[in-house]
Image (cartoon, coloured by chain):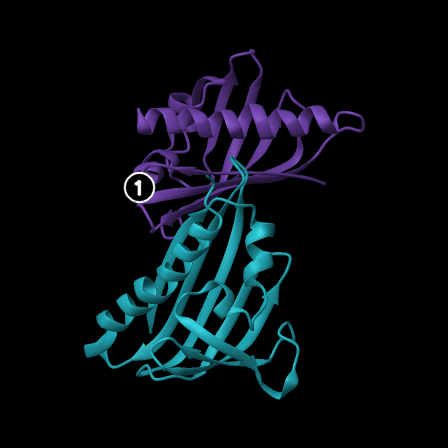
Chain colours: A purple, B cyan
Amino acid sequence: MQRVVRSAIIDAPIERLWDVLRDFNSHAEWHPAIAESQIEGNEPSDRVGCVRNFSLRDGSRIREQLLSLSDREHRFTYCILAADVPLERYVASVHLKPVTDGDRTFWHWESTFRTPPGRERELISLVGVDVYEAGIEGLRKLLTA
Amino acid sequence: MIRVYTSSVIDASAEKVWEVVRDFNKLPAWHPLIVESRIENGHMPDKVGCVRAFRLRDGGFIREQLLSLSDYDFQCIYSILESPMPLTHYIATLKFTPVTDGERTFAEWSAEFDCDPAREQELARHIGQGVFQVGFDALKQRFARR
């Protein structure tokens, strides 16, 4: 099982980040790798169990399901149901915490998954750099512009 | 039950910060309010269950017991056995988490306790700002990048 973790300090109050991140369909607005996204079945994006169906700029498709959403802990978890990229048993969580010293936010993003033999490095870098680091930068830009 | 939560960011890796704070007997080495400390009964400071007895700069005397110590999570949990503060059932957690974006550390210090409702605000401010934030400010300064 692989584990990828990325974390950052964002210069914005936790409520501003959480407002955006709790919307499971918002990534199309802030993540540079995502072309378009929709919630299947016209369900609300904060309904636990809902599925986001999205495409990346390279044309590949992914379906992800919301497994938990906590407004109290500022945390959500989700898994991949189907993807062109071979990330197996992929479960990820996003967790925000307030930095009381300066009204900033600590953003923790992590996942565990399996990969086909020989593709570990490539897929770990895809998740850590292209998804998490690029996503954190994307939302940071949107919020602190 | 009152809960106090203070968090900050320190400009050093969590390993480096943890090296300074993991020793339950070394508060005087990094926290400006504490002048002397010893571990009772000659125990090692990383023996879970050990008791530190220390003095504050203002003369106050406090005894605290180590309840949990994790080198894996960079976390330490302890309770107050004896102190001049009018509170009971005090349990505090000090935790450090790596920030992968830049070699920094997210520092959290929280406590839960019971006290006379009339003194809640004053005690929460004293502990959160007067003790925890002062400790973090000292760590920030110690590790400040020039």
Up-down relation of residue B98 to residue B108 (above or below): above
Question: Residue A95: percent from the left, percent from the top?
Answer: 46, 45
Q: Position of residue A114 (x, y in %)?
A: 71, 35
- Please identify the residue farthest to the bottom as the structure is shown: B41
Residue found at x 67% / y 37%: A113
Q: Name the residue under label 1.
A: A13
Instruction: Between residue A39 and residue B11, name the one nearer to us.
Output: B11
Exactly how many numbered labels are in the figure?
1
Q: What amino acid is labelled 1 in the image?
A: Pro
Return the residue found at the far left: B118
Query: Is A31 placed above or below B95 here?
Result: above
A95, above or below B65, in the image = above
**Along the viewing direction, whichever of A124 and A9 lies nearer the viewer:** A9
Q: In which quarter of the image is residue A129?
A: top right
Residue B24 at least partly seen: yes
Disc 1 packing (10 Å; few <14; some 14–19; many ≥20): some
Label 1: which secondary element: loop
